[in-house]
Amino acid sequence: MKNLINNWKSISTSLFFAMIAVIPFVAVFVYFTLPAFEQKVVESKKQNPRIAVDSVFNILATLQYRVENKELTLAQAQENAQTLIKNLRYSSSEYFWINDSKPTMIMHPIKSELNGKDISEMKDPTGKKIFVEMTNVATSHEEGGYVDYMWPKPNKKDPQPKVSFVKLFKPWGWIVGSGVYMDDIHADVAESRNQNLTVFFLAGLVSLAILLATTIRQLYKVIIPIQNAMKSLHQESTDLSVTAGQLATTSDTIEQSTSTQSSSMEQTSAALVQINSMIEKTKDQAKQSQGTVDQVKESAQKGFSTVSELSSLLTSITQFSNGAATQINQNLLKMNNIEKIIIEIGEKTKAIDEIVFQTKLLSFNASVEAARAGESGKGFSVVAEEIGKLARLSGDTAKEISQIIAASSDEVSAISKEIKQNTESLFSEINGRVMEGSNFAQDCNKVLQQVLEISNEAGVQSQGILTSTAEISLGSNEISKAMNTIESTTRDNLQSVQITAGHSKKITEQSHSLERLVDQLKKIA
């Protein structure tokens, strides 16, 4: 915990720059990605009336088919259509209305007081002739079109902005329309925006937590060991400086002692004891430095292993994501097969309609034959009548099945498209997050490589210290030899002083090199 507090500045700096780096991505999401997504939501909501009107056209086409086959009169078909469409709803409250090209309102499920009335002069608060505009759009566009206007919501008085899709059913001259209110669309867009922002915010918090955990982990595995190594190296450089000063002092003492041979011997012996002690101390410190360097190397190697595990984990996530995408695509293929089966059932229903028609014809012929038979054919007439009723019931059931099949086919197709769009967006985001994690792992790998290079350099420095101590030991041996040759005390002592001074200079240079290395490591840490 103490190390964490001492390095809090480094952690906060890393988090600050990480948040600065995220700002462009947030700006792109808020000002580009999110508005584009919201626009797609608006366009999707506007497509709902079009899809709904096309579904109603399938009903009208079915009734027109029955009129052409003499199963229904035109008046019966239109009456059935009005009854059915009047009760149809989608999105819980959206409805359909029918007017002709005069325009006259044929059927309005909410404002029934308009039915049968001329609506050519009806205007919204902006002065737009609503149904005249709808008639112009429907008659001039074979596939139908959209009209913007203001219209009150059900059970409300104040008009609200609304966009409706209208389309002309040419065989009957009917214009079928349905729409959505813009405030409902805006509410859905706002809800979608809030959901996206919430997910984005939560993802940001998770990323920040991961970054904080990774930074702290890096602190304990890399930075703190390096700081400890720097402290040790700094202490060693200080000790070397002290040793160099002591060697210089000893050299001066030896030089002064040459005036008196006896006192020179005593001072030289004392100096040798000090030199040997310092040599051993320097060797120990150099070995400790080498051990610290090895620890830093080991920590760097562990860091490499951790980064490799992270990369493997990201690869596993990518493989899982791809597998999930494959499974979802297989499910979409199954839904397409379901849609095909529904269409085939619809084809079979047409065959049932033909059988019903033939049954009705058979019932009619049976009734005729029963009438010809007179009194003896009454029982047969009852049977023929029951067959006719059964045929009509079968026809009604086939019609309902056709309607259910049509609705089911459209719904399955819509669900399949929506699932495909959502999964493509989700896996695109997952792949983006995995790519960010891979980049971060590469950055960690580079930092660990730098730490390893610094550790190698520190090892070279430690080896240099050991070499210097060996040279100092050699000088001490030469001084011992000089003591054994009393005859050349003065000359040998002067030579020993020069050798010792040279070694002292080398030690001083080595200590300065260590101090510079410590300063460089402090900057890196």
Image: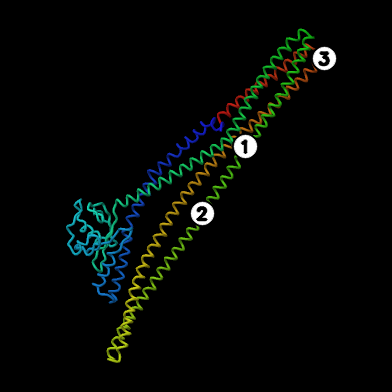
**First-in-chain label (3 vs 2):** 2
**First-in-chain label (2 vs 1):** 1
Dot 3 falls on a residue whose secondary structure is loop
On the rendered structure, is 219 left or right of 138? right
| Of labels 2 and 1, the one closer to you | 1
Where does residue 90 sit, x and y in percent of width and height?
A: 32, 60
Q: Mark 3: give few (<14), some (14-19) or many (20+) Cα within 10 Å.
A: few
Quadrant housing residue 456: top right
Q: Residue at x 62, y 39 (%)?
A: 301
Q: How many marks?
A: 3
- Work out whether 74 lies above or below 146: below
Quadrant housing residue 254: top right
Tags 2 and 1 touching, CB below 8 Å: no
Disc 1 marks a residue whose amino acid type is: Ser
Quadrant position of the C terminus in the picture: top right
Q: Which residue in the structure is indicated by mark 2?
A: 322
Q: Mark 2: give few (<14), some (14-19) or many (20+) Cα within 10 Å.
A: some
Quadrant housing residue 85: bottom left
On the rendered structure, is 492 left or right of 230? right
Q: Residue at x 17, y 57 (%)?
A: 121
As drawn, the label of residue 485 is 3
As drawn, the label of residue 299 is 1
Where does residue 481 sit, x and y in percent of width and height?
A: 80, 18
Disc 3 marks a residue whose amino acid type is: Thr
- Measure how far apart labels 3 and 1 are at the Cα level: 53 Å
Tags 3 and 2 touching, CB below 8 Å: no
